Every structure is written in C-alpha cells, then in structure tokens.
Image (cartoon, rainbow, N blue to C red):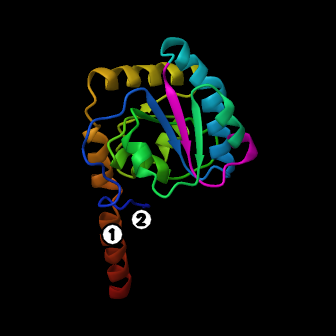
C-alpha cells in the first residue's frame, strides 16, 4: 500500500514560534466525521479548557460548514471561518491542533498537514491510528478519547506553548520520513517497475 502524502514544500511554516492560546481544527466542514468532531470540540471540550484557561480560543477552519458547524461561531471563544484562501496561516498561529474524531477511517490529511507545519496535536485514537505505518511507527501526537482527557491534554499543550513556543520538530520529521509525496512517489514508481519486470 502506498500511503497518502503531503507536499512538504507547501505545508511548512516560516519557523516562527507557536501561537498563544489558539486551538485549531481544519477540514471540510460539511463532512460528517468533521461536523461531529467540530461540534464536540466546541460544545463539550472547549468549555472544559476555558474553565482553566479562560482566554483559550478555537478556530474551526474549512469550507462548506454544515449548519451545526456554522452555529458554533456564536459560542464564546469560537470562530468558524468557512472557506479560506490559505489554511496555513491558521495552523501557523495555533498552539495546538485538535482532532477529536469519533468515526471515519484512514489517513487524516488534515493531521498530516498540521504535523508538517510543526503544530503539536491532540487527537483521538481513530485519528492517530491512520498515521501508524506498516512497520509499526506511531505518530508523535497526544492521544485522548474522552472529553475530559482531551481537554486536559489541550490545556497542557497550551501551557507548554505559552512558556516554550518552539514548534514540534518531531512531528515534522515523522511526516518527512513516512508521508511525503516524494517518498510515496518513489514507492509507487518502484511498484510499477517491479510489475513491469514481471
């Protein structure tokens, strides 16, 4: 199997520090699993975070937000952007990327993009599992599944970024090793050559 990849030349930051107090979730916001995750994040997880860090802010970034997602923009500390010309500035401004996905399957490109830009990530087991490799490598992300554990991990990430805004170089390196288009292209070319040789 040749995995999806990301364009590492495009998905990179200017290597400035992480943002302060900013949580981000990106994706197509009309897609069922993303709608569920966005609603859960804004209505259940963020309030827990804001009881500890009242200035924490969530940006939900992505095209075609479903009505349930658009409605989240009226909540305290939540911005719903809808379609934007470039997602990268939102990732670059974030302290943490959060993807509390409960259903859906496979590689989460939005998580790969965040990791490629060095954004620390808090994700569900489902989201993390898609980035495990055939040889057993596991992504350098914080995994949490219930609302309380996810909120605690987000608070910890926000506090770390406030004292040390260094981007997550390990996340970037993981994508470089396992999920770059260059690597996937080489693997595909090798499979084609092997098939031709047969």
Mark 1 or mark 2: name the one nearer the start of the chain.
2
Asked if disc 1 and disc 2 are in contact, CB closer than 8 Å, the reply is: yes
Left or right: 95, with 24 as reference point: left
Can the viewer see residue 132? no
Q: Residue furthest right?
A: 67
Quarter of the image with the C terminus in it: bottom left
Residue 21 drawn at (x, y percent): 42, 26
42 w.r.t. 14: above or below: above
Q: Which residues are magenta?
A: 55-69
How crowded pointer 2 is (Cα within 10 Å; few <14, some 14-19, many 20+) is rated as: few
Left or right: 183, with 91 as reference point: left
> What secondary structure is marked by label 2?
loop
- The structure residue drawn at horizontal position 62% and vertical position 30%, both measured from the top left corner, is 42
| Residue 56 disc label | none
- The structure residue drawn at horizontal position 32% and vertical position 42%, both measured from the top left corner, is 118
Residue 123 drawn at (x, y percent): 49, 35
Q: Residue 63 in magenta? A: yes
> What residue did someone put label 2 on?
2
Q: CA distance from mark 1 to mark 2?
A: 7 Å
Residue 7 drawn at (x, y percent): 35, 62
Q: Residue 157 in magenta? A: no
**Front residue of 52 and 120:** 52
| Residue 187 disc label | 1
**Front residue of 88 and 41:** 88
Residue 138 drawn at (x, y percent): 37, 41
């Amino acid at each position: 199997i040749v995995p999806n990849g990301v364009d590492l030349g495009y998905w990179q930051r200017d290597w400035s520090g992480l943002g302060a107090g900013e949580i981000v979730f990106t994706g197509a916001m009309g897609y069922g699993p993303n709608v569920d995750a966005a609603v859960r994040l804004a209505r259940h997880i963020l309030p827990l975070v804001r009881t500890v860090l009242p200035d924490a802010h969530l940006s939900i970034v992505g095209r075609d937000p479903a009505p349930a997602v658009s409605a989240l923009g009226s909540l305290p500390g939540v911005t719903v952007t809808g379609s934007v010309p470039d997602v990268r500035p939102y990732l670059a401004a974030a302290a943490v990327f959060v993807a509390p996905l409960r259903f859906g399957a496979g590689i989460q490109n939005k998580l790969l993009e965040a990791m490629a830009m060095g954004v620390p990530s808090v994700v569900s087991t489902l989201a993390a599992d898609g980035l495990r490799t055939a040889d057993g490598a596991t992504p350098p992300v914080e995994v949490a599944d219930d609302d309380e554990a996810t909120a605690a991990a987000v608070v910890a990430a926000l506090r770390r970024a406030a004292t040390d805004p260094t981007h997550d170089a390990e996340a970037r390196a993981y994508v470089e090793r396992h999920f770059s288009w260059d690597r996937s292209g080489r693997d595909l070319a090798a499979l084609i050559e092997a098939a031709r040789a047969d």
